[in-house]
Image (cartoon, rainbow, N blue to C red):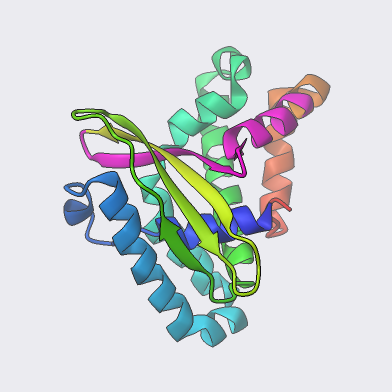
Amino acid sequence: MKRVFTSMLFCLALNTAVAVADTLDPETLVRQTSDQMLAVLKEQHDVIKAEPDRLYDLVDDIVLPHFDFVRMARWVLGKHWRKASPEQQQRFVDEFRTLLVRTYGTALLEYTNQTVRFLPLRMAEGSKDVTVRTEVVKPGGASIPISYSMFHREDGWKVYDVSIDGISLVSNYRADFSAQINSTGMDGLIQRLVERNARGGGAS
């Protein structure tokens, strides 16, 4: 899964000028910020590798504000979300966000000059839900197809799922989290995430 998160991050790291980002169509948003993030990684790679916490801050401040974590949490937990208390829901959203910060940051340390190719966007006029399709091209290796499911809110386009080779990020976590809830309950899953995040470990 690390290659998923590596590609996700540099393709979806969004401009800190949120007011500008909110006015962009989804493909332009991904395209512009992809170029920006690639430049930052190349310029600061050695510094970031020596001080990973800088990268975690970058992910948290630039990338994740453009994900809808409540929507993702609902999809990831499925029926378990409806059964959870409001407090459990909020605790899960917080820990899930931290998990992704750590995961993206760790994966980025392995960045090795990939480039991004954008495929034709199929988007009906006025649509509020779209998939931005890309291919991550690795030097000397096969291209990796990655699709970003996005929907439009009042504050702009937000990511709610990512798929690689047809495998959904949400679905991947959903199976893992559901098994944990069935075994130890919602509080058990949250505690597992708390402990993983405290160790600084993301998903493998």
Q: Nearer the viewer, residue 13 or 139?
A: 139
Note whether 34 is above or below 24 in the view shown. Answer: below
Does the magenta-highlighted stretch encompass residue 104?
A: no
Q: Residue furthest right?
A: 183
Residue 89 seen in this snapshot: no
Q: Which residues are magenta?
A: 154-179
The answer to whether residue 172 is left or right of residue 179 is: left
Q: How many marks?
A: 0
Q: Position of residue 9 (x, y in %)?
A: 49, 59
x, y percentage for residue 38? 43, 72
- Residue shown at 58%/72% (left/top)? 111
Whole-percent x and y of residue 113? 54, 76
The question of residue 158 being in magenta is answered with: yes
Q: Is residue 157 above or below residue 104?
A: above
User: Which residue lies at the image location 59% right of the left edge and 68% below the top edge?
Assistant: 138
Quarter-of-image position of residue 116? bottom left
- Res. 78 image quadrant: top right
